[in-house]
Structures are given as C-alpha cells and as structure tokens.
Amino acid sequence: MKKFALAMGLSLAVSAAPALASSGFQFPKTGVTESAALNGVTVSWQTYAKIPYVKRPSCASCQRLTVYVPEAYLKGGSVNGYTKDTAPIFLPNSVGGYMPGNIADPRKANFDGGESALLAALARGYVVVSPEIRGRTTKDASGRYIGKAPALIVDYKAAVRYLRAVKNKLPAGNTERIISDGTSAGGALSVLLGSTGNDPRYLPYLKKIGAAKARDDIFAAIVFCPITLLSHADEAYEWVFKDETVYHQGKIPGGMMQPPKAAGKGAAPVARPDNAPTEAAAGLPLSAKQIAASKVLARAFPATLNRFALKDAAGKPLILKSDGTGTFADYIRSLYIASAEGALKSGADISRFKCLTVKDGHVTAIDMKTYAKEVNRLKPVPAFDWFDAGSGENDEFGTVKNGPRHFTAFSAARDPKHHAMADAKSVALLDPFTSISRKDVTIAPHFRIRHGFEDRDTVLAVPAFVALKLAEKGADVDSAVKWGKGHAGDYDLDSMFDWADSVVKKAGK
C-alpha cells in the first residue's frame, strides 16, 4: 500500500461534536484514539462507536454505525491533500450471502488475509463509516425475522441519511463525497445504493424505522462481484454453464452457507467473502430434472437480454441470437480476453487456461465452452432460485416467520413443495434495473465494478448488464475483469483508492 504524509497543524484539542444534532440525531462528543500499522507506518484515528442511525431501531443490536476519523483532521492537519472539510467518506458494508452486515474494524485483515480496506482508506485520508445492516437472519425481540428484503438496502440508505442529517456535527467528512463499497451480496448492495438515490419507493420503509429526512444519493459506488439481477441471474448462469453437469456447491438446511472444506477440482482461488457458498469435498451430479431445466434457462436468456436493449460505448446494439451467440457474447469474450492480455503483458503464466488462444504474443480468443469446463460449475440448477427454495437468496426473500420464497415464476412452477412467491415489490426493490430508468432517482455519477476471471458464483453477464445500463444513463463506469481472482473483493487497494481519489479530485469541492 502506498504511504501518505499526514500534515499536522498546531496542536489543537480533539474536536467534539455536540451530543444532539439539530435534526434530533445524536453524535458522540468524544471518540477513542486507536491506531494500527500499515506497511510499517502507524495510522491513527478517532473512533466514534455504535451510534444509532435511526430513531426507531428494529432490534437492540440493529442499525448502528461507527465512524473512524483520521486523527490529523482533529489537529488541524491534512492527509493526502484532504482536510476535515474535503475528506471523502468511505462507506463499506460487510454484507455477504445476504446475511447481516456487522461493524468492521480497521485493525482486522480482509477475508483473504490482506490489508483492511478500512485501514487503507484511513491512511489515504478518508473518513470511514461502517454500518450495521440487517440481513436475512436478523430477528427482533419477539423472534420475527426483520431482515428480509428490502431491509438491507433500507438500512444502507438510512446510514447515508444519518450522515447528512449530522453533517455539520461530524468531526470531519464531506457528505457530498460518499463512496460505498461491497463484495458479493455486499457488492449487490453497493451498486443498489448507487443506483437508487432518493428513490421514493423506499420511503415507507425508511419512515418506519425513523430514518432521517435527508437525501440518500451518493457520489460513487465500488462494486465487487455483485450477486444481483436475481430475477435473471439463473438464465445468465446457464447461458455459460449449460454444458457442465457437475456442480460443487455444498448445502446445509435453512438457506445457510456451507462451512469451508477442501476446494474441489478446478476450484477458483480459495479466499472467499464472508458467507459466500463454499465447495463440497467432491462434485455432485445434476439431476435429470436440473439438466433439462438448464437447457430451458439457457434458451430463455437471449430473449431476456434483448429486452434490455443494451449498447456498447460506441452505441452498437449488444444482442443475442436464439442460439446464444451474437454481439453480446462477443462483448463478454472481449472482457475476458482483455483481462488475460493484461496478465500476459505483466508476465503472468496463463498457459493453464486452454480456453485461451495466444498468437504472436497476444491473447486473441477465448472458447467459452472450454472456459466453463476449466473453471467448473459451482452452483446447481437453478443457481439462485432453487426448486426447493433452499438457497440463501430464497431465504432473503422469506417471510417474517422465516419461510423461504421464490422470486422467479420458473422455479416456483417446478417446486415440489409449492413454496410461495415473494411479493413483486420486495423483488423489485433489490433489483437495480428497476431504479436505473426512473426519472425520480439520482444515480451516483461514478461506479467501479470488478469481476474475477475465475468467478463462478455468478457470471460476467450480470455485472456487465449493470455496467452497460449505468453507462447508458450517463454514469462514469470503470468496469473490468480481474485476472487471478475468483469470487473476491477489496483487492488491488492501491488501484481502488487511486480511482477514488481521481474521481473525487476531478469533481472538486
């Protein structure tokens, strides 16, 4: 990680925000000094812990956030060219598998053992805000499940509203430069926050928990491997993996995720986000019913994609023919090829991927059927809306009594136990596409989206969908496929924060 100078002014008393903001929302008068080493340099900050960000919390340990402020700002100093008034606010969520997101600690390593994105942000001069977010297993005092859809995005929005409500009371941080970050289901949450700013459909839910009456649009969203577009993700998955009849995802009852085991043959890199599905000890064969369903889902995908009328940066339509080929397929291949070409130029050995064609020192083609075989199918059929309603996503759309529900008519019609369908509104409120085209929504001006070359928790078509549609609506989208990564996030932190610095500083004050 790069080192950044902390310019310290004359010694001043630690700034203390008044206990009560004019909006009625509280902010602590004092914080606690904490520090950690990053590449041999001590990074110090003030911690303001577990602040309620709504007036009517859903449970005793719900809907609080912790604010971490670089100590330099409390002494009149600057970090990385930022002051207490201009410092961006880094708002990561720790959601994975649509489970509850807890407050993160900058002193703890990333899930893959790497440095914490929170600590890296503090070293860069960002104010860091880490919120608690309800998830699919959150219960209230009476035992009701209160974290089902759309609770997690409601909470994320409420955290943004709180920051704006107390903006004049914060020790530091520019609430017009809020940058979200998330991985997997948390990546879905980050892109959702960025694409649903001030969407009036969420107001009843925000009012119920006593969220601040403030804006909830943000400046930028950092998105890793988002598990999103759930209504269409099963079709997209089979478009890639339809010829693979062995899957590697373990399963235990209740929509929970399998604890770690030895990775199966052909596994992607093993570091996994919290609560992401892990591999069974050996591959499991798809049933005849699942194999037949895979073909149906794959055949349905072209018509689904074509309804979105996607275009590339030059305005060229990205479509699929009924056989699954077409300009969209070419576009997806080009993203993989660009990733492999970059790796080859950097000196990486890409020879284990027989799906790639290298000619005259350049990657010229990728065979997607071979690619699917080499990375291996992780998920069963369907990948997300399981026929028995046993997936984490089925649980996410469950009832307050924890009854899982379907979110696609395809799976509901094939459920031997006849689980109910989730209400259409809850499904829509977790789908960024339902907001992107609305005129009464403020879309974040900047997005950074990453998908691992070996990711098979979802497929590249999903983040590509989102990136293309956001760009069409005028957002600045930096989207790429990362070589050497599977389902992972918060990697290449120098590059990630270089991007964040660039968009913040380009925008000015």
Image: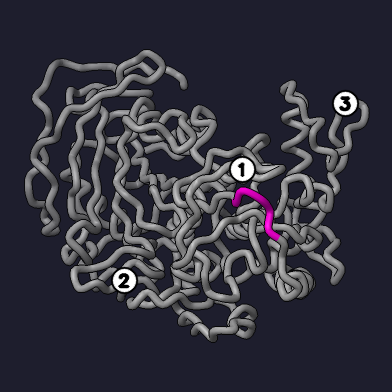
Give the main secondary structure of the magenta stretch. strand
Q: Quadrant of residue 107?
A: top left
Specify the label residue 361 is tagged with.
Answer: 3
Residue range in magenta is 280-284
Q: Is residue 281 magenta?
A: yes
**Quadrant for the C terminus in the image:** top left
Q: Nearer the viewer, residue 281 or 346?
A: 281
Horizontal side, residue 332 vs residue 159: left or right: right
Q: CA distance from mark 2 to mark 1?
A: 33 Å
Residue sticking out furthest to the front: 281
Residue highlighted by disc 1: 263
* N-terminal-most mark, 2 or 1: 2
Horizontal side, residue 300 vs residue 260: left or right: right
Q: Quadrant of residue 467?
A: bottom right
| Disc 3 residue type (three-letter) | Gly
Q: Position of residue 478 (x, y in %)?
A: 60, 43
Res. 280 in view: yes
| Disc 1 residue type (three-letter) | Ala
Res. 303 in view: no
Q: Residue at x 43, y 57 (%)?
A: 193
Q: CA distance from mark 3 to mark 2?
A: 56 Å
Within 10 Å of disc 2 (Cα), the crowding (few <14, some 14-19, many 20+) is many
Q: Residue at x 64, y 80 (%)?
A: 410
| Secondary structure beneath label 1 | loop
Total label count? 3
* N-terminal-most mark, 3 or 2: 2
Residue highlighted by disc 2: 145
Within 10 Å of disc 3 (Cα), the crowding (few <14, some 14-19, many 20+) is few
Q: Nearer the viewer, mark 2 or mark 1?
A: 1
